[in-house]
């Protein structure tokens, strides 16, 4: 099932540069991994903001929370989750 | 280019039932048409709300406005538009 | 899986009294039915407001939306949905 | 009587790691204790957020405040309290 | 126990004048009755607004909801409830 | 005349413990003194929050500002002031 | 003593034109009268809005409420009141 | 022409005491100077807040911005500007 | 001098079609006239909304208010005004 | 195509003065360069605030994001982007 997730990132300015670099690299690797397994199905950058809008396809709320909570950037993100369902006017509902 | 669009629908209660039925049928037909042409690339229902979250792939802001302004339900929708761009951690940016 | 749902009700003042009575009776019957089947696991009234705070236990977002969308009072409610998961300090996680 | 409580946690990044570990362990122990005595009747994690939604069953507002004020994490939480009452469509009101 | 209650009143302009007069008279009579029995312990008008700020002393949330829900003006009021407790610097706590 | 005042307190975490203790003791002494002179007529704790809701009976806005501005905790409080007047349904207006 | 008052006006579109004309004329006469007596000391229009920002010099909160509550346009205005006091850098405080 | 300006002050707690004293003295001197030249025509303290509400009479937006931007406390203030014009019910418009 | 103006339009659904057509034609004629005289220097449509973002170049706040207040659509618009000034990094300031 | 962009700047107080000077000089140079190439078509200062309102003319959302993300002040700005299109009452649409 699908969930719409918005993540606003605010990495503290005084974070050690090496720690920051590692953090961002780890986050990117994890994002790629989750996209390759088909869980993180969409990942877009919001224009002009250090934010993304994403869609996750998970087995349920437990899996979604486990993924979000363990993202390397989690401590520095504000996250909002919106559950989605098939729209009756979507192509998938009108084959 | 991609735009994230949220539409919250509020059809007036006193709308003539026939007019309402026609309106919704026309809206659905238009949504399907725009999905088939590849412009309305995602269309999801927000759980528990008369709202959708959509992504449009258009040639620019003029085309997007023309599409939204002419949706049959436009007079009864509150619409917010968020421009998107490729995320550096997206698969498409890391082939 | 569990979802936290808040419903704020605003039945129009000019609704026909008989229609209103039928509406409320049907809503109540549906709420009781869904509680008996174990789907609507908690239903509380917010003190001083025509609102409820509820918890649903459903198979996923599709089922939850189907339930909410078809509630008799749906056209007259503002609904917000918050996905829940087990808390690591909950008794269920610390048997 | 029942109160709905939402707690949003924001532990400062510069808190001493040992102090943090002790704080979280103490908070968890206290949460378990209050659940076992039947006062903290529901405790859920909000998906994607360092927040919980809870329901307390207390003798009154004094007891509820005493509990919340003395939670180990209290200085680092934003708390909102909503009084609840039995819903006329709840099973308990329709035996 | 004490609850802080704010009520913002918005009586519809098209309400029948007689119905309005009866409504306001009934509301006033009820407010006086509840003050005389010691339940509605404070009732102030907010300057420049059709609103009041009140404090109720009730046996619990059930009684408070029952009182508010049955106020004649309830259908035309927006009500917010804030639970109170004794302040450690209040005279009553420092006899 | 009466003013409704809400104070939300946020003492910085890094305040010297002795300074904090002195600050809180001075604030409490001042609150008690103002209650004894009949100026600070009500002082309640908001359940679950480091906040109070108060009512002051002062000769006017100058006196009220002088009192609030000079509270020991003033630099660490967010204060909102709401002017009150007698409610036409209050007992005092219906002797 | 001084109070800052903002009034946002929203006269219903379906008000009888004669009633509207009378209402506005009465409001204007009352505003002029209160200015001449020195109670309504400032009255400005907010650019681009059907709103005013005013300052009243009254004997207290009772007088202010009585004035505002009885303005002809009161039923069609949203009013917010902010108590003022002399600023320590004002000329009046530094003669 | 007139502009309504609200300034909310938040001087950092860790500012050097001498620097703070100089800053406040300079701000006060500047405020007095601008009042004496007739530019800063009203300056009131908001009761219970480290804020002022002011009215400026300037030749235009350039002059207003130049004044506000160069106030000694500018870096520590949140400022909102509302353009004013003569009210049709003001005495000045009804000589 | 320049002012940034946002106008959100909400023409009532029950407005007489002829009246609506006249209203919109008059508004458009007035907008064109003001653009030709150099007062309404920019006029853009917000994508997906019945709103515009505009910049006016006027002699002052009186002229701006006079223009906005007399727009045919004024009764059906929510307007917000933001005063502008030359930016120190603008080309005009760095010839 | 055009985008309306508002940037609110908050440079940290503890930034090294030399670093700050370099930052601001680089930002100004970049702003001038982008104006000269016709991309940053309008740049205004908001009166009384460390903010600008701008209009960009870009080939699309990718170019806009690339520009904004790489502004020297980006880490210290809150940015909001609003897509624009030609207004049907604009001169350009009515030659």
Image (cartoon, coloured by chain):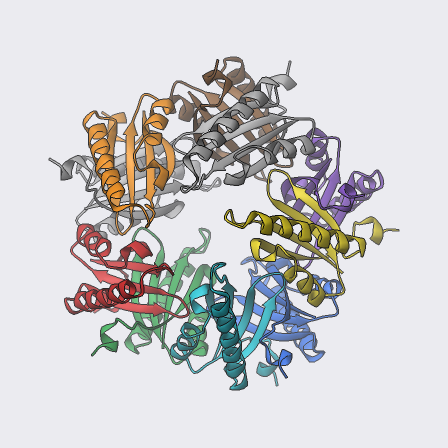
Chain colours: A purple, B yellow, D brown, E orange, G red, H green, I cyan, J blue
Q: Position of residue E91 (x, y in %)?
A: 24, 30
Toward the right, the furthest residue is B95
Q: How many marks?
A: 0
The answer to whether residue E76 of the structure is visible from this angle is yes
Where residue H80 sits, quadrant-wise, is bottom left
Q: Is residue E47 found left or right of I89 in the rendered image?
A: left
Q: Position of residue I45 (x, y in %)?
A: 60, 68
What residue do we see at 46% from left, 52% from top? H14
Q: Nearest the camera: B21 or E6? A: B21
Q: Is residue I32 found left or right of G3 in the rendered image?
A: right
Where residue J93 sits, quadrant-wise, is bottom right
Q: Nearest the camera: B17 or A64? A: B17
Q: Is residue B55 found left or right of D22 in the rendered image?
A: right
Q: Position of residue D21 (x, y in %)?
A: 61, 28
Q: Is residue I83 found left or right of I53 in the rendered image?
A: left
The answer to whether residue E87 of the structure is visible from this angle is no
The answer to whether residue H44 is above or below residue D41 is below
Image quadrant for the N terminus of chain G? bottom left
What residue do we see at 70% from left, 37% from top? A68
What residue do we see at 25% from left, 44% from top? E45
Q: Position of residue G93 (x, y in %)?
A: 23, 64
What residue do we see at 33% from left, 39% from top? E6
Q: Nearest the camera: H42 or B75? A: B75
Image quadrant for the C terminus of chain G? bottom left
Q: Nearest the camera: I36 or A8? A: I36
């Amino acid at each position: 099932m699908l969930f719409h997730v918005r993540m606003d990132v605010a990495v503290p300015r005084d974070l050690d540069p090496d720690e920051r670099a590692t953090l961002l690299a780890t986050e990117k690797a994890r994002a790629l991994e989750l996209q390759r397994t088909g869980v993180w199905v969409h990942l877009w950058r919001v224009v002009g903001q250090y934010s993304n809008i994403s869609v996750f396809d998970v087995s349920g709320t437990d899996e979604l929370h486990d993924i979000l909570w363990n993202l390397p950037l989690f401590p520095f993100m504000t996250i909002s989750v919106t559950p989605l369902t098939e729209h009756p006017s979507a192509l998938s509902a009108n084959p």
